[in-house]
Amino acid sequence: MTLARREFHLFQASGRDFAYLVPSAAIFALDTPSAAVLRVLGEGPRSDEAVVVALGDRFDADTVQTAIRELVDVRAIGYEHTPDPKPPRMLPMASFPLNTMVLNVTNQCNLACTYCYEYGEDKIVDTEHGQQSKFMSEATARDSVEFLLKESGPSRIAHLTFFGGETLLNFPVLQSTIAYARQRAAEVGKTIDFSLTTNATLLKPEIIEFLAENHVGVTISMDGPRELQDKFRVFHNGAGSYDVVAPKITALLRRHRSRPIGARVTLTSDTLDITRIYRHLTEELGFWEVGFAPVTTSPQQQYAIGEQGFDRMLAQFRALAAEFLACVAENRHHGFSNVKDTLEEIHKGVSKAYPCGAGLGLLGVSTDGDVALCHRFAGSDAHKFGTVRDGIDRDVQRAFLAQHHIDDKTDCSQCWARPLCSGGCYHEAHVRYGTTQRPNLHYCEWIRGWTDTCLQIYGELSERNPEFLARFDRDAVKAEAVL
Ligand code: SF4
Ligand code: SF4
Protein backbone atom coordinates (compact mmCIF):
# COMPACT_ATOMS: atom_id res chain seq x y z
CA MET A 1 0.00 0.00 0.00
CA THR A 2 1.37 3.40 -0.96
CA LEU A 3 1.61 6.17 1.61
CA ALA A 4 1.51 9.85 0.69
CA ARG A 5 1.60 13.16 2.52
CA ARG A 6 -1.70 14.91 3.12
CA GLU A 7 -2.21 18.59 3.77
CA PHE A 8 -0.06 20.13 6.48
CA HIS A 9 2.50 22.83 7.05
CA LEU A 10 5.74 21.97 8.84
CA PHE A 11 7.34 24.44 11.19
CA GLN A 12 9.92 24.45 13.94
CA ALA A 13 9.77 25.91 17.40
CA SER A 14 11.78 25.36 20.57
CA GLY A 15 14.07 23.06 18.59
CA ARG A 16 11.18 20.71 17.71
CA ASP A 17 9.24 19.94 14.56
CA PHE A 18 5.51 20.62 14.44
CA ALA A 19 2.88 20.03 11.78
CA TYR A 20 -0.11 22.32 11.26
CA LEU A 21 -2.76 19.97 9.92
CA VAL A 22 -4.89 21.81 7.40
CA PRO A 23 -8.15 19.82 7.38
CA SER A 24 -8.47 19.94 11.18
CA ALA A 25 -6.49 23.18 11.86
CA ALA A 26 -4.79 21.23 14.67
CA ILE A 27 -1.13 21.35 15.65
CA PHE A 28 0.77 18.13 16.08
CA ALA A 29 4.16 18.03 17.85
CA LEU A 30 6.35 15.60 15.94
CA ASP A 31 8.80 13.27 17.61
CA THR A 32 11.99 12.46 15.71
CA PRO A 33 10.70 9.31 13.94
CA SER A 34 7.47 11.07 12.82
CA ALA A 35 9.42 14.03 11.46
CA ALA A 36 11.70 11.60 9.62
CA VAL A 37 8.73 9.76 8.07
CA LEU A 38 7.28 13.04 6.82
CA ARG A 39 10.62 14.01 5.31
CA VAL A 40 10.89 10.68 3.47
CA LEU A 41 7.36 11.07 2.13
CA GLY A 42 8.19 14.62 1.15
CA GLU A 43 10.26 13.11 -1.64
CA GLY A 44 7.19 11.34 -3.00
CA PRO A 45 4.71 8.54 -2.18
CA ARG A 46 6.19 5.26 -0.93
CA SER A 47 5.02 1.96 0.53
CA ASP A 48 5.28 1.34 4.30
CA GLU A 49 8.09 -1.08 3.63
CA ALA A 50 10.04 1.46 1.57
CA VAL A 51 9.72 4.02 4.39
CA VAL A 52 10.95 1.45 6.92
CA VAL A 53 13.93 0.67 4.66
CA ALA A 54 14.72 4.34 4.04
CA LEU A 55 14.91 4.97 7.79
CA GLY A 56 16.47 1.61 8.67
CA ASP A 57 19.82 3.12 9.64
CA ARG A 58 18.18 5.38 12.28
CA PHE A 59 15.13 3.58 13.68
CA ASP A 60 13.94 -0.01 14.04
CA ALA A 61 10.93 -1.16 12.02
CA ASP A 62 8.49 -1.06 15.00
CA THR A 63 9.35 2.58 15.73
CA VAL A 64 8.77 3.59 12.12
CA GLN A 65 5.50 1.64 11.92
CA THR A 66 4.27 3.29 15.12
CA ALA A 67 5.12 6.72 13.70
CA ILE A 68 3.29 5.86 10.47
CA ARG A 69 0.18 4.76 12.39
CA GLU A 70 0.12 7.96 14.44
CA LEU A 71 0.55 10.12 11.37
CA VAL A 72 -2.24 8.26 9.58
CA ASP A 73 -4.47 8.70 12.64
CA VAL A 74 -4.01 12.49 12.62
CA ARG A 75 -4.36 12.50 8.82
CA ALA A 76 -0.94 14.03 8.18
CA ILE A 77 -0.38 11.12 5.79
CA GLY A 78 -2.68 8.54 4.25
CA TYR A 79 -2.87 5.58 1.90
CA GLU A 80 -3.40 6.50 -1.69
CA HIS A 81 -6.28 4.05 -2.14
CA THR A 82 -8.19 5.70 0.75
CA PRO A 83 -8.17 9.40 -0.12
CA ASP A 84 -9.16 11.78 2.63
CA PRO A 85 -12.92 12.23 2.44
CA LYS A 86 -13.67 15.85 1.60
CA PRO A 87 -15.69 17.28 4.48
CA PRO A 88 -19.23 18.15 3.41
CA ARG A 89 -19.77 21.79 2.55
CA MET A 90 -21.50 23.27 5.59
CA LEU A 91 -23.51 26.46 5.30
CA PRO A 92 -24.39 28.29 8.52
CA MET A 93 -27.88 27.76 9.88
CA ALA A 94 -30.58 29.96 8.43
CA SER A 95 -31.09 32.09 11.54
CA PHE A 96 -27.48 32.64 12.53
CA PRO A 97 -27.57 34.99 15.58
CA LEU A 98 -26.21 38.49 15.23
CA ASN A 99 -23.33 38.94 17.63
CA THR A 100 -21.92 42.35 16.69
CA MET A 101 -23.70 45.31 15.16
CA VAL A 102 -21.54 48.17 13.88
CA LEU A 103 -23.56 51.35 13.86
CA ASN A 104 -22.40 54.10 11.48
CA VAL A 105 -23.76 57.00 13.50
CA THR A 106 -22.41 59.40 10.89
CA ASN A 107 -20.71 59.16 7.54
CA GLN A 108 -19.11 62.58 7.98
CA CYS A 109 -15.58 63.16 9.19
CA ASN A 110 -13.67 66.19 10.42
CA LEU A 111 -10.43 64.73 9.11
CA ALA A 112 -9.58 64.16 5.46
CA CYS A 113 -7.14 61.26 5.72
CA THR A 114 -5.62 60.87 2.28
CA TYR A 115 -6.00 57.08 2.25
CA CYS A 116 -9.53 56.86 3.68
CA TYR A 117 -11.62 54.22 1.92
CA GLU A 118 -14.79 56.21 2.59
CA TYR A 119 -13.83 59.33 0.71
CA GLY A 120 -11.18 58.53 -1.88
CA GLU A 121 -11.49 57.08 -5.37
CA ASP A 122 -12.09 53.64 -3.89
CA LYS A 123 -15.24 54.65 -2.03
CA ILE A 124 -18.26 52.38 -2.34
CA VAL A 125 -20.88 54.84 -1.11
CA ASP A 126 -21.13 58.52 -2.04
CA THR A 127 -21.54 60.08 1.39
CA GLU A 128 -21.43 63.64 0.08
CA HIS A 129 -24.09 63.52 -2.67
CA GLY A 130 -25.73 60.14 -2.03
CA GLN A 131 -29.11 59.46 -0.48
CA GLN A 132 -27.99 58.40 2.98
CA SER A 133 -28.39 60.93 5.79
CA LYS A 134 -25.18 62.40 7.06
CA PHE A 135 -26.10 61.66 10.68
CA MET A 136 -28.08 58.82 12.21
CA SER A 137 -31.19 59.99 14.02
CA GLU A 138 -32.08 58.94 17.54
CA ALA A 139 -35.10 57.05 16.19
CA THR A 140 -32.96 55.00 13.78
CA ALA A 141 -30.46 54.27 16.55
CA ARG A 142 -33.29 53.00 18.77
CA ASP A 143 -34.65 50.84 15.94
CA SER A 144 -31.12 49.48 15.53
CA VAL A 145 -30.97 48.53 19.20
CA GLU A 146 -34.29 46.68 18.89
CA PHE A 147 -32.94 44.98 15.78
CA LEU A 148 -29.80 43.86 17.63
CA LEU A 149 -31.76 42.54 20.62
CA LYS A 150 -34.09 40.60 18.33
CA GLU A 151 -31.52 39.27 15.86
CA SER A 152 -29.09 38.22 18.58
CA GLY A 153 -31.53 35.36 19.18
CA PRO A 154 -30.73 33.16 22.16
CA SER A 155 -27.41 34.92 22.95
CA ARG A 156 -27.50 36.75 26.25
CA ILE A 157 -24.73 39.14 25.31
CA ALA A 158 -24.52 41.28 22.18
CA HIS A 159 -21.92 43.80 21.04
CA LEU A 160 -22.71 47.28 19.76
CA THR A 161 -19.87 49.18 18.13
CA PHE A 162 -20.22 52.85 17.16
CA PHE A 163 -18.45 53.83 13.99
CA GLY A 164 -18.24 56.63 11.42
CA GLY A 165 -17.10 58.82 9.65
CA GLU A 166 -15.91 60.32 12.88
CA THR A 167 -18.10 58.70 15.50
CA LEU A 168 -17.95 61.52 18.04
CA LEU A 169 -19.48 64.00 15.56
CA ASN A 170 -22.74 62.38 16.61
CA PHE A 171 -21.98 62.08 20.31
CA PRO A 172 -25.54 63.04 21.44
CA VAL A 173 -27.01 60.04 19.59
CA LEU A 174 -24.24 57.77 20.86
CA GLN A 175 -24.98 58.90 24.41
CA SER A 176 -28.74 58.43 24.24
CA THR A 177 -28.38 55.11 22.42
CA ILE A 178 -26.23 53.64 25.18
CA ALA A 179 -28.78 54.64 27.82
CA TYR A 180 -31.65 53.24 25.76
CA ALA A 181 -29.82 50.02 24.85
CA ARG A 182 -28.83 49.35 28.44
CA GLN A 183 -32.41 49.78 29.64
CA ARG A 184 -33.95 47.66 26.86
CA ALA A 185 -31.34 44.92 27.24
CA ALA A 186 -32.08 44.67 30.96
CA GLU A 187 -35.81 44.43 30.22
CA VAL A 188 -35.26 41.43 27.94
CA GLY A 189 -32.60 39.80 30.16
CA LYS A 190 -29.59 40.55 27.97
CA THR A 191 -26.35 42.49 28.27
CA ILE A 192 -24.94 44.79 25.62
CA ASP A 193 -21.22 45.49 25.44
CA PHE A 194 -20.36 48.91 23.93
CA SER A 195 -17.32 50.04 22.01
CA LEU A 196 -16.37 52.72 19.53
CA THR A 197 -13.70 53.76 17.10
CA THR A 198 -12.64 57.40 16.95
CA ASN A 199 -9.90 59.60 15.56
CA ALA A 200 -9.67 61.27 19.01
CA THR A 201 -9.89 64.86 17.69
CA LEU A 202 -13.18 65.54 19.47
CA LEU A 203 -12.41 63.98 22.84
CA LYS A 204 -13.04 66.38 25.69
CA PRO A 205 -13.45 65.96 29.46
CA GLU A 206 -17.24 65.34 29.41
CA ILE A 207 -16.93 62.75 26.65
CA ILE A 208 -14.01 61.01 28.36
CA GLU A 209 -16.00 60.94 31.59
CA PHE A 210 -18.98 59.41 29.82
CA LEU A 211 -16.88 56.73 28.10
CA ALA A 212 -15.13 55.80 31.34
CA GLU A 213 -18.32 55.71 33.41
CA ASN A 214 -20.09 53.58 30.84
CA HIS A 215 -17.17 51.17 30.32
CA VAL A 216 -17.15 51.85 26.61
CA GLY A 217 -14.30 50.07 24.80
CA VAL A 218 -12.29 52.59 22.78
CA THR A 219 -10.10 52.08 19.73
CA ILE A 220 -8.24 55.11 18.44
CA SER A 221 -7.25 55.32 14.78
CA MET A 222 -3.76 56.72 14.87
CA ASP A 223 -0.65 56.25 12.79
CA GLY A 224 2.20 56.95 15.21
CA PRO A 225 4.59 59.80 15.97
CA ARG A 226 3.93 63.30 14.64
CA GLU A 227 5.64 63.04 11.25
CA LEU A 228 3.92 59.73 10.44
CA GLN A 229 0.50 60.73 11.79
CA ASP A 230 0.62 64.03 9.92
CA LYS A 231 1.49 62.47 6.58
CA PHE A 232 -2.04 61.21 6.00
CA ARG A 233 -4.20 61.98 9.02
CA VAL A 234 -4.87 65.64 8.26
CA PHE A 235 -7.75 68.10 8.66
CA HIS A 236 -9.60 69.42 5.61
CA ASN A 237 -7.24 72.41 5.49
CA GLY A 238 -4.27 70.03 5.27
CA ALA A 239 -3.05 70.61 8.83
CA GLY A 240 -1.73 67.57 10.66
CA SER A 241 -3.74 66.17 13.58
CA TYR A 242 -1.00 64.91 15.89
CA ASP A 243 -0.80 67.97 18.11
CA VAL A 244 -4.58 68.00 18.50
CA VAL A 245 -5.01 64.32 19.36
CA ALA A 246 -1.94 63.56 21.49
CA PRO A 247 -2.99 65.53 24.62
CA LYS A 248 -6.59 64.27 24.29
CA ILE A 249 -5.39 60.69 24.14
CA THR A 250 -3.20 61.24 27.20
CA ALA A 251 -6.23 62.57 29.08
CA LEU A 252 -8.36 59.62 27.96
CA LEU A 253 -5.75 57.06 28.99
CA ARG A 254 -5.36 58.74 32.37
CA ARG A 255 -9.08 58.68 33.18
CA HIS A 256 -10.46 55.61 31.36
CA ARG A 257 -8.90 52.62 33.02
CA SER A 258 -11.77 50.13 33.19
CA ARG A 259 -10.96 48.67 29.77
CA PRO A 260 -7.73 48.41 27.81
CA ILE A 261 -7.53 51.10 25.13
CA GLY A 262 -5.96 50.22 21.82
CA ALA A 263 -4.64 52.05 18.80
CA ARG A 264 -5.31 50.93 15.27
CA VAL A 265 -2.65 51.90 12.77
CA THR A 266 -3.14 52.03 9.01
CA LEU A 267 0.10 51.13 7.28
CA THR A 268 1.04 52.63 3.94
CA SER A 269 4.15 52.32 1.80
CA ASP A 270 5.24 55.69 3.23
CA THR A 271 4.79 54.86 6.90
CA LEU A 272 6.17 51.33 7.24
CA ASP A 273 8.08 51.86 10.44
CA ILE A 274 6.34 49.41 12.68
CA THR A 275 8.70 49.16 15.62
CA ARG A 276 9.00 52.91 15.91
CA ILE A 277 5.23 53.38 15.69
CA TYR A 278 4.68 50.67 18.29
CA ARG A 279 7.21 52.21 20.70
CA HIS A 280 5.71 55.65 20.36
CA LEU A 281 2.14 54.53 20.87
CA THR A 282 2.83 52.25 23.83
CA GLU A 283 5.81 53.78 25.61
CA GLU A 284 5.32 57.48 24.90
CA LEU A 285 1.52 57.75 24.70
CA GLY A 286 0.62 54.78 26.90
CA PHE A 287 -1.70 52.63 24.74
CA TRP A 288 -2.24 49.13 26.13
CA GLU A 289 -2.17 47.53 22.72
CA VAL A 290 -1.59 48.37 19.08
CA GLY A 291 -2.96 46.64 15.98
CA PHE A 292 -1.68 47.27 12.47
CA ALA A 293 -3.53 46.88 9.18
CA PRO A 294 -2.24 47.56 5.68
CA VAL A 295 -4.15 50.31 3.88
CA THR A 296 -7.02 49.12 1.68
CA THR A 297 -6.65 50.73 -1.70
CA SER A 298 -6.22 50.07 -5.37
CA PRO A 299 -2.60 49.23 -6.33
CA GLN A 300 -2.29 52.44 -8.42
CA GLN A 301 -2.20 54.67 -5.35
CA GLN A 302 1.31 55.77 -4.54
CA TYR A 303 0.80 54.87 -0.85
CA ALA A 304 -0.43 51.32 -1.64
CA ILE A 305 1.79 48.61 -0.22
CA GLY A 306 3.43 46.67 -3.05
CA GLU A 307 5.27 43.37 -3.03
CA GLN A 308 8.47 44.79 -1.55
CA GLY A 309 6.46 46.68 1.02
CA PHE A 310 4.77 43.46 2.14
CA ASP A 311 8.23 41.86 2.53
CA ARG A 312 9.36 44.80 4.60
CA MET A 313 6.19 44.72 6.64
CA LEU A 314 6.62 41.00 7.30
CA ALA A 315 10.23 41.45 8.44
CA GLN A 316 9.14 44.17 10.88
CA PHE A 317 6.12 42.18 12.10
CA ARG A 318 8.50 39.28 12.76
CA ALA A 319 10.87 41.46 14.76
CA LEU A 320 8.02 42.79 16.91
CA ALA A 321 6.56 39.30 17.26
CA ALA A 322 9.94 38.07 18.56
CA GLU A 323 9.77 40.80 21.18
CA PHE A 324 6.21 39.71 22.03
CA LEU A 325 7.44 36.14 22.51
CA ALA A 326 10.33 37.21 24.76
CA CYS A 327 7.93 39.18 26.99
CA VAL A 328 5.09 36.69 27.11
CA ALA A 329 7.42 33.75 27.77
CA GLU A 330 8.30 35.59 31.01
CA ASN A 331 4.69 36.52 31.76
CA ARG A 332 5.21 40.16 30.90
CA HIS A 333 2.64 42.12 28.92
CA HIS A 334 3.27 43.00 25.29
CA GLY A 335 0.71 44.95 23.30
CA PHE A 336 1.23 43.74 19.73
CA SER A 337 -2.38 42.71 19.20
CA ASN A 338 -1.98 41.21 15.71
CA VAL A 339 0.05 38.34 17.12
CA LYS A 340 -2.20 37.81 20.13
CA ASP A 341 -5.31 37.67 17.94
CA THR A 342 -3.76 35.11 15.59
CA LEU A 343 -2.49 32.99 18.49
CA GLU A 344 -6.01 32.89 19.87
CA GLU A 345 -7.38 31.65 16.55
CA ILE A 346 -4.65 29.01 16.30
CA HIS A 347 -5.29 27.88 19.85
CA LYS A 348 -9.00 27.53 19.25
CA GLY A 349 -8.38 25.51 16.09
CA VAL A 350 -10.28 28.06 14.01
CA SER A 351 -10.97 26.79 10.50
CA LYS A 352 -12.90 29.39 8.59
CA ALA A 353 -15.36 28.83 5.81
CA TYR A 354 -15.56 32.66 5.59
CA PRO A 355 -12.77 35.19 6.20
CA CYS A 356 -14.52 37.13 8.97
CA GLY A 357 -17.86 37.54 10.67
CA ALA A 358 -19.22 39.97 8.04
CA GLY A 359 -22.66 38.92 6.83
CA LEU A 360 -22.79 36.27 9.50
CA GLY A 361 -22.47 37.26 13.17
CA LEU A 362 -21.46 40.82 12.28
CA LEU A 363 -23.43 43.39 10.28
CA GLY A 364 -23.05 47.09 9.64
CA VAL A 365 -25.89 49.63 9.83
CA SER A 366 -25.94 52.81 7.74
CA THR A 367 -27.10 56.20 9.00
CA ASP A 368 -30.58 55.53 7.55
CA GLY A 369 -30.85 52.07 9.08
CA ASP A 370 -29.93 49.92 6.09
CA VAL A 371 -28.24 46.73 7.19
CA ALA A 372 -25.06 45.90 5.30
CA LEU A 373 -22.45 43.18 4.96
CA CYS A 374 -20.22 45.12 7.39
CA HIS A 375 -19.53 48.73 8.39
CA ARG A 376 -17.34 49.29 5.32
CA PHE A 377 -20.30 48.53 3.06
CA ALA A 378 -22.86 50.48 5.10
CA GLY A 379 -25.16 52.38 2.74
CA SER A 380 -24.25 50.33 -0.33
CA ASP A 381 -27.39 49.03 -2.04
CA ALA A 382 -25.41 46.22 -3.64
CA HIS A 383 -24.38 44.89 -0.23
CA LYS A 384 -27.62 45.44 1.64
CA PHE A 385 -28.92 42.70 3.93
CA GLY A 386 -32.22 44.32 4.94
CA THR A 387 -33.08 47.20 7.24
CA VAL A 388 -33.21 47.56 11.01
CA ARG A 389 -36.95 48.05 10.75
CA ASP A 390 -37.71 45.03 8.55
CA GLY A 391 -34.97 42.73 9.85
CA ILE A 392 -32.32 40.70 8.05
CA ASP A 393 -33.28 39.59 4.58
CA ARG A 394 -32.45 35.94 5.14
CA ASP A 395 -32.69 35.09 1.40
CA VAL A 396 -30.04 37.69 0.56
CA GLN A 397 -27.88 36.52 3.43
CA ARG A 398 -28.22 32.85 2.41
CA ALA A 399 -27.32 33.68 -1.19
CA PHE A 400 -24.29 35.67 -0.09
CA LEU A 401 -23.02 32.87 2.14
CA ALA A 402 -23.59 30.29 -0.59
CA GLN A 403 -21.52 32.37 -3.05
CA HIS A 404 -18.63 33.16 -0.72
CA HIS A 405 -17.78 29.79 0.81
CA ILE A 406 -14.06 28.91 0.86
CA ASP A 407 -14.82 25.77 -1.20
CA ASP A 408 -15.62 28.06 -4.13
CA LYS A 409 -12.30 29.92 -3.94
CA THR A 410 -10.40 27.48 -6.11
CA ASP A 411 -7.20 29.54 -5.88
CA CYS A 412 -7.20 28.86 -2.13
CA SER A 413 -7.93 25.12 -2.36
CA GLN A 414 -4.26 24.09 -2.14
CA CYS A 415 -3.17 26.75 0.33
CA TRP A 416 -2.15 25.57 3.80
CA ALA A 417 -3.08 28.96 5.35
CA ARG A 418 -6.72 28.78 4.31
CA PRO A 419 -8.14 27.72 7.73
CA LEU A 420 -7.10 31.14 9.06
CA CYS A 421 -7.24 33.33 5.94
CA SER A 422 -10.14 31.95 3.95
CA GLY A 423 -9.45 34.38 1.12
CA GLY A 424 -9.21 37.57 3.19
CA CYS A 425 -11.31 40.71 3.65
CA TYR A 426 -14.32 41.22 1.33
CA HIS A 427 -13.78 44.95 1.28
CA GLU A 428 -10.14 44.61 0.23
CA ALA A 429 -11.24 42.20 -2.52
CA HIS A 430 -13.95 44.60 -3.67
CA VAL A 431 -11.49 47.49 -3.88
CA ARG A 432 -8.80 45.42 -5.63
CA TYR A 433 -10.87 43.24 -7.93
CA GLY A 434 -14.33 44.80 -7.97
CA THR A 435 -15.98 41.80 -6.33
CA THR A 436 -16.24 40.40 -2.83
CA GLN A 437 -16.03 36.88 -4.27
CA ARG A 438 -12.37 36.96 -5.27
CA PRO A 439 -9.67 35.90 -2.80
CA ASN A 440 -7.01 38.52 -2.07
CA LEU A 441 -4.24 36.81 -4.01
CA HIS A 442 -2.04 39.93 -3.96
CA TYR A 443 -1.05 39.28 -0.34
CA CYS A 444 -0.81 35.49 -0.09
CA GLU A 445 2.92 35.44 0.57
CA TRP A 446 2.49 37.94 3.35
CA ILE A 447 -0.39 35.94 4.89
CA ARG A 448 1.50 32.66 4.73
CA GLY A 449 4.68 34.25 6.09
CA TRP A 450 2.82 35.85 8.97
CA THR A 451 0.82 32.70 9.76
CA ASP A 452 4.06 30.69 9.80
CA THR A 453 5.56 33.19 12.27
CA CYS A 454 2.53 32.95 14.55
CA LEU A 455 2.63 29.16 14.40
CA GLN A 456 6.26 29.24 15.49
CA ILE A 457 5.41 31.55 18.37
CA TYR A 458 2.54 29.26 19.30
CA GLY A 459 4.92 26.27 19.32
CA GLU A 460 7.43 28.19 21.44
CA LEU A 461 4.80 29.26 23.95
CA SER A 462 3.37 25.76 24.17
CA GLU A 463 6.77 24.77 25.60
CA ARG A 464 7.74 27.92 27.46
CA ASN A 465 4.49 29.37 28.81
CA PRO A 466 1.52 27.06 28.12
CA GLU A 467 -0.42 28.91 30.80
CA PHE A 468 -0.57 31.98 28.53
CA LEU A 469 -2.27 29.91 25.82
CA ALA A 470 -4.60 28.25 28.35
CA ARG A 471 -5.99 31.71 29.13
CA PHE A 472 -7.67 31.68 25.73
CA ASP A 473 -9.74 28.69 26.95
CA ARG A 474 -10.66 30.44 30.17
CA ASP A 475 -11.65 33.58 28.26
CA ALA A 476 -13.85 31.42 26.05
CA VAL A 477 -15.44 29.75 29.08
CA LYS A 478 -16.06 33.16 30.64
CA ALA A 479 -17.69 34.35 27.44
CA GLU A 480 -19.87 31.23 27.29
CA ALA A 481 -20.86 31.68 30.92
CA VAL A 482 -22.47 35.02 30.14
CA LEU A 483 -24.13 33.75 27.00
S1 SF4 B 1 -6.04 34.35 -0.24
FE1 SF4 B 1 -4.01 33.44 -0.53
S2 SF4 B 1 -3.23 33.10 1.56
FE2 SF4 B 1 -5.43 33.39 1.71
S3 SF4 B 1 -6.29 31.30 1.66
FE3 SF4 B 1 -6.33 32.12 -0.44
S4 SF4 B 1 -4.43 31.39 -1.36
FE4 SF4 B 1 -4.19 31.21 0.86
S1 SF4 C 1 -15.16 42.38 5.27
FE1 SF4 C 1 -13.17 43.24 5.83
S2 SF4 C 1 -13.65 45.22 6.79
FE2 SF4 C 1 -15.55 44.02 6.75
S3 SF4 C 1 -15.58 42.96 8.76
FE3 SF4 C 1 -14.60 41.57 7.27
S4 SF4 C 1 -12.41 41.95 7.50
FE4 SF4 C 1 -13.48 43.70 8.41
Image (cartoon, rainbow, N blue to C red):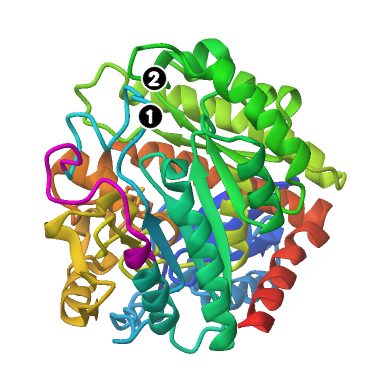
Question: Amino acid type of disc 2?
Answer: Phe
Report whether residue 162 is seen.
yes
Q: Which residues are magenta?
A: 126-141
Q: Residue placed at 35% from the left, 58% from the top?
A: 422
The answer to whether 267 appears left or right of 289 in the picture is left
Residue 440 visible in the shown view: no
Residue 66 percent coordinates (x, y): 65, 76
Reading the image, the residue beneath label 1 is: 110
Provide the secondary structure element on which disc 1 rests: loop
The front one of 61 and 389 is: 389
Q: Residue at x 32, y 55 (%)?
A: 136
Residue assigned mark 2: 235
Inter-mark Cα distance, 1 to 2: 6 Å
Above or below, 322 relative to 236: below
Magenta region includes residue 387: no
Label 1 close to label 2 by CB (< 8 Å): yes
Question: Where residue 201 appears, x then y in whole percent?
Answer: 51, 29
Residue 415 appears at what percent x and percent y? Answer: 35, 54
Q: Residue at x 39, y 70 (%)?
A: 142
Q: Tell me if 393 is positioned left or right of 178 in this view.
A: left
